Image: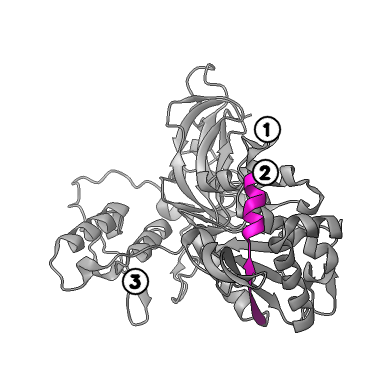
Amino acid sequence: MSRINEFKLPDLGEGLTEGEILKWLVAVGDDIELNQPIVEVETAKAAVEIPAKWAGRVVEIHHPEGATVEVGTPIIAIDTDPGGGDLPTPSAASLAAVEVAPAEGAVEPGLIGGPAPGGRTAVLVGYGPKASTAKRRPRKGGEPAEVAAVPAQAVSAPAAPAVAPAPAAPASVAPVERNGRAAPLAKPPVRKLAKDLGIDLSTLVGSGPLGSITRSDVLGAQDRGAAEPAVAADRERRVPVKGVRKLTAENMVSSAFTAPHVTMFLTVDMTRSMEAIERLRALPDWRDVRVSPLLLVAKAVLLAVKRHPMVNSTWAGEEIIVKDYVNLGIAAATERGLIVPNIKDAGRLSLRELADAMTALVQTAKSGKTPPSDMSGGTLTITNVGVFGVDTGTPILPPGESAILAFGAVREMPWVHEGQIQIRQVTQLGMSFDHRIIDGELGSAFLRDVGAFLTDPEATLLAWT
C-alpha cells in the first residue's frame, strides 16, 4: 500500500461542485495530525476549514492560494509513514513499460521488447503498440487533432551513425485556431485568473513550455497595466464574482423571475417594545445576554406564523408544502457578501434560547465560519436593514421561501398616542411574499399581527399563548 495519500477536495454539501482555496494552514514538510485543519476553502455557501483525513507529513501542495478547484480534485499529498525511511522509487517493471523497444534481434525472442511470433513485439499487458489512429480530446471551438500511432518497431534505437547529424531545428507548435485566430496556450487556472483580472490572453507572450502563458505572465501584465497612465482605467476596480457573492446573485435572479413578489409596509409604534428590552437587560439572568429589538421582531414573526401557518410554506408546482417548523433565517452582511444562516426549529425555543441562538449565529457569520448546513433549509427570513440607518425596503425572497420581513431603523418621531402628539419610538416593516401562496388578505393579517406584538409585546404574548 502506498505511503503517499492524495487528499481530494471533498463534497461540502448542497451540490457544490467547486471551491476556492483561501489559505493553506500547512506547508510542505509540516507534520500534521488526524483532523487537523489544513486548508481554508470558500464555496458558494461559506468559508470553511477542512481537516486532514490522515496523520503524516505534507509532501506536496498541488494548488496555490486563490485557485478554484473542482470537488474530487487532489489538493495535497500526505506521507502517512514519514518515519519509514526514504520514499520508494519507481520499480524497474514500471520503467520497462515506458522504455523504447530495442531493435529486432537485440532481445531474445519472446522476452519483453523482443520479437514475438507473427512479427509482433512482446510487450507488457496494456502497453502494446497500437495500430489505430488516436485522437486528442478536442479543444473548445476546435476540431480534434489526429495523432498517428507509431508502432514500436518504428521507434527502435538505430545503430550509431559514423558522423553525428546536426541537431534539427525545434518544430514550432501551432496553436489551435479559435474563431479565426490562434488561441493562446494556458492552463485552466491561468485562464480563470486572466478572466478575473480582465486580461486578454491573446495580448500576452508566454514564458512557459511551448510558449504557454503562466500565472507570472498574467500577474506581470496586471502590474504593467496598473503602471500605464490611463484616463479612467486607473480609477476602476474589478471585483471577481465568485463564492458567496456569485451564489447570492444567482439565487436573487432566480427568485425575482420565478416567484411573483408583492410587498406591503406597516409603520409601528415600538415604544413599549423598547421599554420591554430595557427591562429584560436589567434582569439578573439577562445581564450577559445580547438583547436587541431584532430579538422581539423574531419572536413576533414566530408567534404570527403559528396564527398563519400558510406563510411558512414552499411552492412545489402541483402542491404547496406547509411546514410545521420554522427554520428562521437572519440575513447577515459579511466581507464575502450577504449570507442567510438560519436557526433550526426556532419556534420551539424560549425567548432566552432564541437570544442565545441569534447571538451565536451573528458571531459565526462575522467570523466567516458559517457551515453550509446552517445556510440550507431556511423557511422564513428576517433582514434587519435598520442597523444601516434605513427605514425599510422591498426584500427579495430567498429561493424556496414564501415570505421575508425587512425591519427598519427605530427612530424617535411625533406620533398620535392616546389622542395626543407625543415623541414615540417608531419603525417601519416591509414584507415581501410569494403571491402564488399568500394573497393580500393573508399577507395583511400576518403583517398586522407582527406589528401588534411589537406595539404591545406583553399584552399580546398573554393573549396569544
Between disc 3 and disc 2, the foreground one is 2
Residue 96 image point, x, y percent: 50, 38
The secondary structure type at the circle numbered 3 is loop
Q: Answer left or right for 210 relative to 460.
A: left
Between disc 1 and disc 3, the foreground one is 1
Front residue (pair 44, 176): 44
| Residue at the spot of label 1 | 284
Residue at 19% x, 61% y is 226
| Residue at the spot of label 2 | 280
377 relative to 78, above or below: below
Query: How would you rate the neighbour count of disc 2 (Cα within 10 Å): few for under 14, some for 14-19, many for 20 or more?
Result: some
Residue 35 image point, x, y percent: 61, 30
Residue 277 image point, x, y percent: 64, 49
> Mark 1 to mark 3: distance in Å?
71 Å
Give the residue type at disc 3. Ala
The secondary structure type at the circle numbered 2 is helix
Residue at 41% x, 56% y is 189
Point out the tag, 1 or 3, that comes first from the N-terminus.
3
Residue 405 falls within the magenta-colored stretch: no
The secondary structure type at the circle numbered 1 is helix
Res. 226 visible in picture: yes
> Mark 3 to mark 2: distance in Å?
67 Å
| Residue at the spot of label 3 | 183
Residue at 73% x, 57% y is 457
Residue 57 image point, x, y percent: 50, 26
Q: Are marks 3 and 2 in contact (CB under 8 Å)?
A: no
Q: Magenta span covers which residues? A: 261-278
Give the residue type at disc 2. Leu
Give the residue type at disc 1. Pro
Point out the tag, 3 or 2, that comes first from the N-terminus.
3
Q: Quadrant of residue 1?
A: top right
Q: Are marks 1 and 3 in contact (CB under 8 Å)?
A: no
